[in-house]
Image (cartoon, helix red, strand yellow):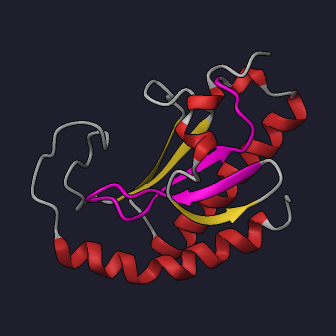
Amino acid sequence: MSDGGANACPLCATDGGALVWRGTRVRVIRADEAGFPAFYRVVWNAHAAEFSDLSAAERVHCMEAVTAVEQALREHLAPTKVNLAALGNMVPHLHWHVIARFAWDSHFPAPVWAAAQRPSPADEEAALRARLPAAEAAMVAALQTLR
């Protein structure tokens, strides 16, 4: 497989956000997405554009990491819904978006990439940010078993 443009890939050149955990195959970052403090990405460390570029065992490993992040968000933040997406249209490097969504968020029930439906509630966001360290600690604990 060619490098698929890995030399110019922003997810090859940088972590892509605030690093929460790095294993040998994947890393988890908290994205800086305004209005969505519990927006995480599970990024495949090696450059791959598509999920099907991975072996069967690698796909299982990747999804176990996605599951660990989702479960930590559900347990510690009690979101209305957790959204999962692997688009890669803007950055063709395999990464999964794991986004805790709340009925109060500015876009709910629409996708985070749609137009806002209301102003973002600063108090709710601040309260959510205060709970992120516990959620991230739970992610790390679960992810350590994957290595």
- Does the segment drawn in magenta span residue 27? yes
The residue positioned farthest toward the front in the image shown = 7
Name the foreground residue: 34 vs 47. Answer: 47
Percent coordinates x, y for residue 46 in the rendering: 75, 38
Name the foreground residue: 147 vs 100. Answer: 147
- What residue appears at the point 24 percent right and 58 percent down from the top-left corner? 105
**Bounds of the magenta span?**
26-49
- What residue appears at the point 56 percent right and 74 percent down from the top-left corner? 135
- What residue appears at the point 56 percent right and 30 percent down from the top-left corner? 8
Please state, as top left, top right, bottom left or bottom right, where the N terminus lies in the image: top right
Q: Quadrant of residue 47?
A: top right
In this image, 32 relative to 115: left or right?
Answer: right
Above or below, comparing residue 17 to residue 56 in the picture? below
Percent coordinates x, y for residue 10 in the rendering: 53, 39
Percent coordinates x, y for residue 113 in the rendering: 29, 38
Percent coordinates x, y for residue 76 in the rendering: 53, 75
In this image, 128 relative to 16: left or right?
Answer: left
